[in-house]
Image (cartoon, rainbow, N blue to C red):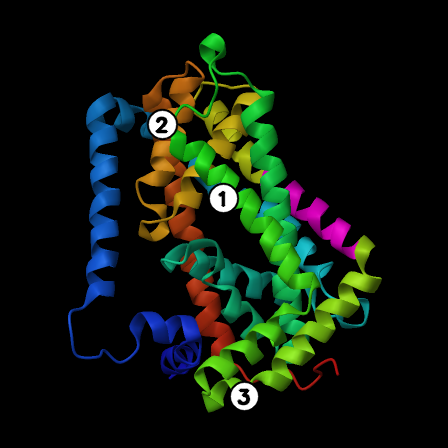
């Protein structure tokens, strides 16, 4: 029963319907694209493993031993830091949402961000839907958008600093491939555009424009919600500048904690790296994830660690092994996120909802 309730809730999201809804007749392009992305990602991993030999990777993976327990627990650091970032993205009068509930909802959303092909934004509608059990939907959606803006702004700073503070071996630029610089510039441009949309009452305007073009009745029904969303965003950006800055700082701290996981894993396998090297490897991993054309960034994530280690003069086998260890950790926490989604969707909304 809870599983059925969970699936029913997920079907109400636009993301789910677009991905797994009723299939129309015709060629299944989306299915082929998803499968092609998985095949490409697995192929990249196979090529990388063959490049360094599986025995080297297997040996390194075995060095961690009981350290796997610490690696599985360590993500609580950035989970809590990023949840604080979301907390400060709520307007002050709605910030009384229980921190534990906020943490669980964010973890669920991030799980779907990982699993859905949309990457980075796929789980945001699910966060808003679950958050609406405690605050009005417009406020929930506004907090999700503001938190995402703060997180992406922190990500630009994190990646930019990580790719410039630490010089690779030989003094070469870390942007060794054109797609790396392109991905970073696209991220920066995307953040600027996103911030502009959030501060210019753009959602209700876009909704009205789309309705004028299509005359679809569903768009007209959403106008009041889009106006409420723009109102919430406007009030926050007018009166909550300090809260937004705090959100950026908390998300930035979460990104640093995530990057320090690299240093922790290298230390546990007996090959310590400097803080700057760990930051650069973490930044490179983020750049490759931004490309995002494979589900869960399969292959791209591993490639980012491989190329960053190579650029720093570290054994690429170690970089690839660290990526695979982090992938194991990711699978574990995605399992936790799916379990929390099942648990939350099976419970009734809290009657003490903040009005």
Task: Residue 350: tell me if it is visible.
Answer: yes
Quarter of the figure with the C terminus: bottom right
Local secondary structure at mark 2 = helix
Q: Residue at x 63, y 46 (%)?
A: 153
Q: Residue at x 43, y 81 (%)?
A: 12
Q: Residue at x 23, y 57 (%)?
A: 33
Quarter of the figure with the N terminus: bottom left
Q: Residues within 10 Å of mark 1 (few under 14, many from 20)?
A: some
Residue contact between numbered discs 2 and 1, judged by CB atoms under 8 Å: no
Disc 2: which residue = 306
Q: Position of residue 237 (x, y in %)?
A: 77, 61
Q: How many marks?
A: 3
Local secondary structure at mark 3 = helix
Disc 3: which residue = 220
For residue 71, side relative to residue 197 (left or right) = left
Disc 1: which residue = 186
Name the foreground residue: 325 vs 12.
Answer: 12
Q: Which residues are magenta?
A: 243-256
Separation (CA) of disc 3 from disc 1: 32 Å
Q: Position of residue 47 (x, y in %)?
A: 21, 31
Per the picture, the main secondary structure of the magenta-coloured stretch is helix
Name the foreground residue: 27 vs 302.
Answer: 27
């Amino acid at each position: 029963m809870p599983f059925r309730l969970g699936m029913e809730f997920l079907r109400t999201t636009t993301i789910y319907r677009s991905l797994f809804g009723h299939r129309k007749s015709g060629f299944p392009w989306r299915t082929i694209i998803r499968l092609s992305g998985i095949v490409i990602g697995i192929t990249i991993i196979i090529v990388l493993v063959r490049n360094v030999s599986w025995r080297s990777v297997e040996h390194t993976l075995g060095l961690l031993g009981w350290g796997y327990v610490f690696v599985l627990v360590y993500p609580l650091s950035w989970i809590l830091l990023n949840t604080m970032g979301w907390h400060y993205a709520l307007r002050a009068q709605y910030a009384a949402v229980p921190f534990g509930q906020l943490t669980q909802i964010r973890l669920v959303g991030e799980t779907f961000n990982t699993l859905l092909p949309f990457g980075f934004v796929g789980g945001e509608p699910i966060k808003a839907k679950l958050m609406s059990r405690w605050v009005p939907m417009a406020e929930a959606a506004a907090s999700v958008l503001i938190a995402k803006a703060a997180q992406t702004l922190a990500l630009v700073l994190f990646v930019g600093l990580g790719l410039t503070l630490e010089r690779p071996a030989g003094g070469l630029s870390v942007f060794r491939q054109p797609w790396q610089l392109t991905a970073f510039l696209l991220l920066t441009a995307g953040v600027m555009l996103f911030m502009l949309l959030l501060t210019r009452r753009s959602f209700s305007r876009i909704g009205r424009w789309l309705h004028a073009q299509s005359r679809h009745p569903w768009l007209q029904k959403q106008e009041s919600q889009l106006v409420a969303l723009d109102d919430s965003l406007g009030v926050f950006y007018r009166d909550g500048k300090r809260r937004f800055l705090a959100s950026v700082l908390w998300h930035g701290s979460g990104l640093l904690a995530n990057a320090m996981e690299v240093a922790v894993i290298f230390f546990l396998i007996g090959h310590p790296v400097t803080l700057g090297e760990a930051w650069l490897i973490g930044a490179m991993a983020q750049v490759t994830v931004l490309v995002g054309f494979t589900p869960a960034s399969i292959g791209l994530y591993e490639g980012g660690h491989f190329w960053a280690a190579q650029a720093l003069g570290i054994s690429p086998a170690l970089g690839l092994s660290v990526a695979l260890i982090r992938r194991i950790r990711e699978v574990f926490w995605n399992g936790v996120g799916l379990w929390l989604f099942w648990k939350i969707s099976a419970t009734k909304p809290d009657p003490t909802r903040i009005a």
